[in-house]
Each structure stands twice: as C-alpha cells, then as structure tokens.
Amino acid sequence: MSRRELREQIFKLLFRVEFNSMEEMPEQEQLFFEEEDTAKEEDAAYVSEKYNKITEKLTKIDALLNEKAEGWDTTRMSKVDLTILRLAVYEIMYDESVPTGVAINEAVELAKKFGQDASSGFVNGILAKFA
C-alpha cells in the first residue's frame, strides 16, 4: 500500500474511537482488520502500530487542539474533522518521519474525501497553527 492508503486506513481505524470505549477498541481493531483489505501483513502491522501510538497520546493531542483552535474545542468539532486533525497533529508533533507540510497536505486530502464541504478549509486552518 502507498503511504496515502496506509494513512487512510489509520484514519478509518482511529475514527472508531469516537463510537467505542477504549476498552472495546482491541476488539474493534480486530474487526477492522477482518473487514478491511490490508493484503500485506507489514501494512496491517504499520497501521496498528501507528494507531496505537496515536491513541496513547490522544489526551495530549486533544489538549493541543483545544489550545490552538480558537473558538472551537474538540467536543464541538465534527467526528470526521476531529479524527483527521488527531492523525495530522500526531504526525506533526510526534512522527519525525513525516514532514509537517506532508502531514497537512494529506490531512486536507482526507478532509476532501471524507469530510463536509468546508472540512478541508477548517482542517487546513487549524493545522496551519501547528506549522
């Protein structure tokens, strides 16, 4: 899988956090890999590893988002936008293998694909504060 496809898989798995408790997420992760087509074992391992790293820092990431997003907080954001922002903020702040510009661009692309009409601008505007 390409990096973009892997990022999309991480987004889809991370999105489930919004609808399940953290105690339920190991089972949800297992179901995710049964449902999704991650043909290569190393791709599934990459998705799982990055997802777990993000969820470990979810509280910190949400605090950063609440600090930077003036007039917004994570409880008011759409679930799709919030998930995209969490993934991108993790990549910007904690993943040295992803350049900031790439993280922002990929987040905007995810917002165009999965979000509402204004999602890409919203995501870009908030992430610009992290750049």
Image: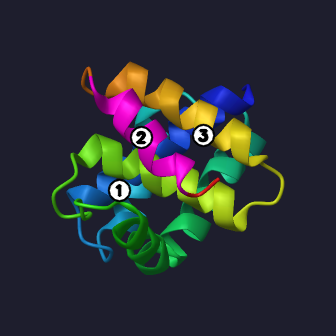
Residue 30 visible from this viewpoint = no
Distance from Cα at disc 3 to Cα at disc 2: 8 Å
**Badge 1 density bin: few <14, some 14–19, many ≥20, Cα 10 Å:** some
Magenta region, residue range: 118-129
| Among numbered discs 3 and 1, the one appearing first in the sequence | 1
Residue 127 at x, y percent in the picture: 51, 49
Front in this rendered view, residue 13 or 59 = 59
Q: Which residue is rendered at x = 61% and y = 31% of the image?
A: 105
Q: Are marks 1 and 2 in contact (CB under 8 Å)?
A: no
Where does the image place residue 91, in percent across and percent down from the top left?
65, 55
Under circle 3, the secondary element is helix
Task: Say which residue appears at 53% left-offset and 45% top-offset.
Answer: 10
Chief secondary structure of the magenta portion: helix
- Residue 123 - label: 2
Is 75 placed left or right of 74 in the picture? Answer: left
Q: Residue 114: x and y, percent?
A: 35, 26
What's the CA distance linking mark 3 and mark 1? 27 Å
Please give the residue where the numbered disc 3 appears in the rendered image.
104
Mark closer to the observer (3, 1): 3
Frontmost residue, 68 versus 41 = 68
Query: Whole-percent x and y of residue 63?
Result: 40, 77
Q: Secondary structure at mark 2?
A: helix
Q: Amino acid at mark 3?
A: Ile
Disc 2 residue type (three-letter) = Val
Residue 27 included in the magenta stretch of the image: no
